[in-house]
Image (cartoon, grey):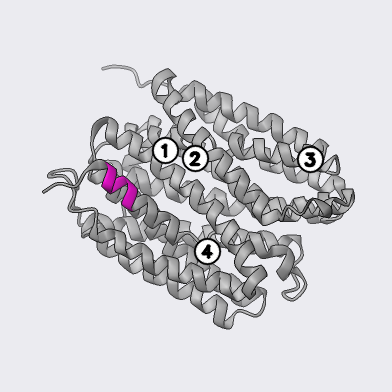
Amino acid sequence: MGRSPLLITASLSVGLMLGQLAIMAIPALSVDLAVPWALDASRIGWLGGIYFAGYAVALPFLTGAANRMDGRIVYLVAALISAAASFCVALFADGFWGALVLRFAAGIGFAGIHIIGMKLLVDRLGGDAQLRASAFYTAAFAIGSGCSFLAAGWLSRLYGWEAVFVSAGLGSLLSMLVLLLIGPPLKGSEIRSKRLFPDLPLALRDAEIVRYVIAYGGNLWEVFAVRVWFVPFLVFNMTTNEAAGLKLDPATAVGLSVFVAVPLNLFIAELGVRWGRKPVIFAVSVASIVVCGLLGWQASGLYMLVLALLLIHGVTSYGDVGAIAGGVVAASTAETRAAALALFGLVGFTFGFLGPLAVGLAIDLAGGRDEPSAWFWAFMVMALGSVISAAAMAWKPKRKPET
């Protein structure tokens, strides 16, 4: 008996949110851990980004495995890796190098929860249900990111930073329960292969898949850069404006920015279905470039103005990701889907690793976190992501001459 699209989408979305409680733990705690772990801007960038490097490195192996066997087994193993890595951070990490290794391992586990979860989703749905479920699953990623910030801020204040990673490990273990609810894939929707890795050249030959993969890379460059640097930037602005009396914890503020973006993400994804994804993604990307420019210009400006711009940036930076995900799903077929999703995650999360690191290097080169000009250059580097996404939508590949 087939499961309803609603149950499948809701189950895997909840599993994704539980499995990503660790994703923004380090960014939320970066200011608190800066002194005991001796973290400068570059090291914060490394710790913020290395999670996504682990994701990118593991993805070809995990998607290849999911194309050879039941994807639910791959998901289960990945969730166990993610849980073990988070528990080890709580128990053993006492500085930069240990945390770096363990966060890399946590990223490996999350790759299986996220992208294999997406494959489990699209293999069980078809037609418009498949496209809309992809947008909801992407929105769940945003909600999980916000929950990660909120949980980290709340738990660290009550019980210390170690409790943040204990809860993240428990979340990964609980995510495995959703596998009991999703049922088998639709008959004929899951292609089995003997290949060790997905056939990435197959996806690269499709210009539409490549377009959305490039856009996703640009999107995650900016999204993860601002997620990693949101708390240090807001702390800088609060310090220069003596705004601490407002009592808005930076981790809470970034969580709020994510939740504001979620309904608009779904709305923008629906606009993409109705009006065409390319113009919608292009418009949102251009808007994000403008907001980045304003944030860099007003880095030490009025706290409420900066906070408002950060909330707007949460929409413009992440708002089009549902449309981008829907685009790559629509462009792929049952034969190309595993390769398309592998390329999608590999390129996206490689850029997600490089974005926070590039911002950290820019801040250090421009004088450090206490310099307003350093934050100007930080946002200019972030904006490169939306430049890439806009260019991908404007790209007109040459058509091969008909024979």
Circle nearer the N terminus (4, 2): 4
Residue 79 tag number? none
Using a 10 Å C-alpha cutoff, classify the residue at mark 1 as few (fewer than 14 neighbours), some (14 to 19) or many (20 or more): many
**Mark 4: amino acid:** Ala
Q: Tell me which amino acid carries mark 3.
A: Met
Q: CA distance from mark 1 to mark 3?
A: 33 Å
Q: Residue 270: which quarter of the image?
A: top left
Q: Which residue is mark 4?
A: 22
In the rendered structure, which disc, 1 or 4, sits on the residue that comes first in sequence?
4
Q: Nearer the viewer, residue 197 or 243?
A: 243
- At horizontal 83% and vertical 53% (from top left) the residue drawn is 245
Residue 187 in view here: yes
- From the viewer's side, name the closer residue of 241 and 319: 241
Residue at image location 40% in from the left, 40% down from the top: 136
Query: In the rendering, at what x and y percent does residue 267 appear?
Result: 47, 29
Which residue, given by chain and number where applicable, does mark 1 sit on? 325
Q: Which label was assigned to residue 304?
A: 3
C-alpha separation, residue under disc 1 versus residue under disc 4: 22 Å
**CA separation in Å, label 4 and label 3:** 29 Å
Q: Which residues are magenta?
A: 6-11
Q: Is residue 210 above or below residue 53?
A: above
- Visible in this render: residue 397? no
What residue sits right under mark 2 in the picture? 216
Asked whether the beta carbons under mark 4 and mark 3 sit within 8 Å of each other, the answer is no
